[in-house]
Image (cartoon, grey):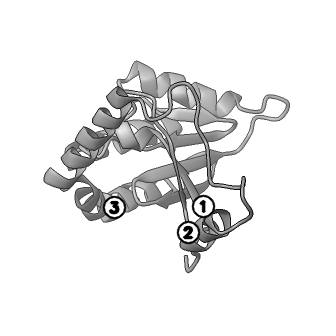
Amino acid sequence: FGVTPDMITLAKGLTNGSVPMGAVLVSDRVYDTFMQGPEGIELFHGYTYSAHPVACAAGLATLGIYQREGLLTRAKSLAAHWEEAAHALRGAPHVIDVRNYGLILGVELEPIPGKPGTRAFDVFVKCFERGVLVRQSGDVVALSPPLIVEPSQIDQMFSTLGAVLRGQ
């Protein structure tokens, strides 16, 4: 996107969501501003459970798995398959927009007048009943699979979601 952020916050992916952990990454410019500022000003944050050894160990183990199994590269290689399957949903009844970035997807649905969120909630329930877990936020159905997802599972997800959207 051609943007260099000053700060990035991250959490669940550090430990695969298994143990609570978060982090804030800052640019050198922001870091230097804090570290070269007047005495008493520093880039400090810390709470009772900060840097807990269990969370840190889980984070290191998770990052090691990402590297050893090449999960980030693998996710990138699945992106074209994901995008093709996702955009096949365009034209399904009540679909306003299909947006994705990598393996993240949002399908915006036309709201039912006077009942915002109901259409997407119904899709959520019907997909769940068929063994596919989607997320619903307002009238958007969202998917973001685990990095170990297989192409056949991607096909199943989109086949199920497409059938539900088409009332089948």
* Lower sequence index among marks 3 and 2: 2
What type is the residue that disc 2 sits on?
Ser
- Circle 3 packing at 10 Å, graded few (<14), some (14-19), many (20+), is some
- Residue drawn at the location 23% of the way across and 52% of the way down: 71
Q: In this rendering, would 92 be left or right of 58?
A: right
Residue 118 location (% of width, % of height): 69, 28
Foreground residue among 78 and 83: 78
Name of the residue lying farthest toward the top: 129
Q: Which residue is mark 3?
A: 79
Residue 94 in sight here: no
Q: Which of 28/105 is in front? A: 28
Which is more toward the observer, 102 or 125? 102
Give left or right: position of 118 versus 168. right
Residue 61 is at least partly visible in this image = yes
The mark lying in front, picked from 3 and 1, is 1
Residue position for label 1: 7
Asked which secondary structure carries label 3, the reply is helix
Q: Earlier in the sequence, mark 1 or mark 2?
A: 1
Q: Is residue 55 above or below residue 24?
A: above
